[in-house]
Amino acid sequence: MSEQTKTSCGFVALVGAPNAGKSTLLNRMAGAKLSIVSPKAQTTRFRTLGIVMRGQSQIIFVDLPGIFKPRRRLDRAMVNAAWNGAQDADLTLFLVDARKGLKDDVREIAGKLKKSERPVWLVLNKTDLVPPETLLPLARDLSELLSVQQVFMVSAQTGAGVEDLLDRLSVSLPSGPYLYPEDDLTDLPDRLLAAEIVREQIFFQTQEEVPYQTTVETESYKDRPDGSVRIDVTVYVSRPGHKAILIGEKGRRIREIGMRARQQLESLLGHPCHLFLNVKERAGWDEETARLKALGLSDFA
């Protein structure tokens, strides 16, 4: 039997309500930061691939936006992208925050997944934050709403249960050749990664409403002769007040955002970065096709 026929490869969608811990789980399984994380919901806006080698299997995780009730064109595109990604995957991991339990949004997602013909595995996350005796009843209640092939109890934050999940996934994917080079971690272009790292810092360093009214785009990404890279990034905000908050007194906040984002990028990319941020007010950016296209969401709007 040839080496190629022994390998397996498949797409695994991470689906759940906002803040279920999908991005944290992806980063934990990949062993690297591929998707931005914040304590706030709706951080992920577009599909991010995380490529994990496990034995003779290549597991291609698809981190999708959290599923919620959309209000804006951007929201609709995010939710449509999530459901589209779930339909295209070989199997779906349905992530549920064990602390929150069986809320209405979880019931609604379960109802839609039930209509899908794709196999679904239930993953109860944040199990380190709840009494153990609550987990089996929650798993039972969810299994009554939706037929799931397997149930896992994990903590993406601590790593508990994650290795077992990876082992089970590695022997459950269809046989076939690898779709990506074995040393690839993601298909995310560096220029998009730069924009996401800046957006993550905006989540961490600004007030509650600001991150949701902000989008970040890399305008220019140029390699320099000395091995460093120059990255020019534009931050679009919806309101004048948000621009003032982002810039901060005497530009202190935007400098702090830039400094922390640059440090992360240098660690991820492995070479020096010269990062320049520009903040522009643009009312209604979340309804513009060009802005959605920059996020890879124009096909879902």
Image (tube, rainbow, N blue to C red):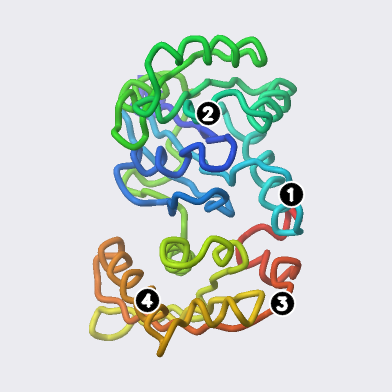
Measure the alpha-carbon separation of dots 2 and 3. 35 Å
Image quadrant where one finds the N terminus = top left
Q: Is residue 7 visible?
A: no
Neighbours of disc 3 within 10 Å: few (<14), some (14-19), many (20+): some
Helix, strand or loop for disc 3? loop
Numbered mark located on residue 164 in the image: none
Q: Earlier in the sequence, mark 1 or mark 3?
A: 1
Q: Where the C terminus falls, by quadrant?
A: bottom right
Q: Do the residues labelled 4 and 2 touch (CB within 8 Å)?
A: no
Q: Position of residue 256 (x, y in %)?
A: 34, 76
Label of residue 96 in the image: 2
Q: How many labels does the image show?
A: 4
* Residue designated by label 1: 70
Q: How crowded is mark 2: few (under 14 residues within 10 Å), some or many (20 or more)?
A: many
Q: Is residue 14 above or below residue 202?
A: above
Amino acid under label 2? Answer: Val
Q: Is mark 2 on a helix, strand or loop?
A: strand
| Nearer to the camera, 265 or 38 | 38
SS of the residue under disc 1: loop
Residue positioned 63% across, 82% down in the render:
240
Q: Relative to 11, is 72 on the left or the right?
A: right
Q: Can residue 40 be seen in this view?
A: yes
Q: Real-space Cα distance between discs 4 and 2?
A: 34 Å
Residue found 51% across the figure and 32% down from its top: 12
Nearer to me, 70 or 26:
70
Disc marking residue 283: 3
Residue linked to disc 4: 258
